[in-house]
Amino acid sequence: MTNASDQPLRETKKSAERSTSELISSAPNALDSIDRQIISHLQRDGRRAYGAIANEVGLSEAGVRRRVQRLKDSGVMQIVAITDPLQLGYGREALIGIRVHGDVRLVADKIASIDEANYVVMTAGSFDIIAEVIASMTTHSSTS
């Protein structure tokens, strides 16, 4: 049984979720504060339970799940596993920031096609692309 005081909270949650969907579809760069909080929690721990996030941001677990799915579907974020190349047996690693003049997606695709490019992302800020490149100690070594 619900009481009258529960109804405005549910409506507010539904309105917030609906407005987020409209924001993402009409302007992908426009996120509300709840979206940003959800992203922040997932950046700290990509496996954090939606229920725990819901308690922090004031939404239902289902509301958080829907927002995360919308953020992923719209390309705003992705959840990935980050590995330690040294622990995986690779002896050389570089994180490279790249500035591009021209089609950023084309350059990112070309970099991603390189076997040693483990992680390639398009970013906003100082660099257009960040790439992690890893190689074994014997890969591409030259003799003197």
Image (tube, helix red, strand yellow):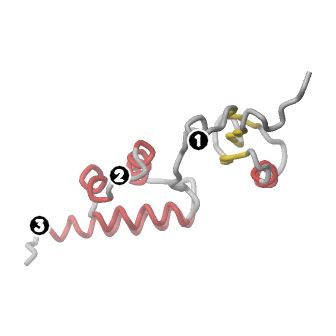
Mark toward the start of the polypeptide (1 vs 2): 2
- Residue 101, compared with residue 143, is above or below; it is below
Q: Quadrant of residue 99?
A: top right
Say above or below: 55 vs 126: below
Q: Amino acid at mark 1?
A: Leu
Place of residue 10 in the rendered image (x, y in percent of width and height, measured from the top left): 23, 68
- Position of 94 compared to 22: left or right? right
- Which residue lies at the image location 73% right of the left edge and 33% below the top edge? 137
Q: Is residue 102 left or right of residue 30?
A: right
**Residue 58 place in picture, x, y as percent:** 26, 55
- Please give the name of the residue rendered at 45% of the width and 45% of the height, measured from the top-left corner: 43
Q: Which residue is mark 2?
A: 48
| Quadrant, the N terminus | bottom left
* Label placed on residue 5: 3
Instruction: Give the quarter of the image for residue 124.
Output: top right
In this view of the protein, which residue sits in the foreground, 133 or 92?
Answer: 92
Q: Foreground mark, 1 or 2?
A: 1
Q: Tell me, yes or no, whether the two marked residues, 1 and 3, touch with CB atoms within 8 Å.
A: no
The structure residue drawn at horizontal position 28% and vertical position 56%, both measured from the top left corner, is 54
Closer to the camera: disc 1 or disc 3?
1
Q: Which residue ends up furthest to the top in the rendered image?
A: 144
Query: Which of disc 3 and disc 1 is earlier in sequence?
Result: 3
Disc 1/disc 2 C-alpha distance (Å): 25 Å
Quickly name the residue at label 1.
Answer: 88
Secondary structure, mark 3, is: loop
**Residue 116 falls in which quadrant of the image?**
top right
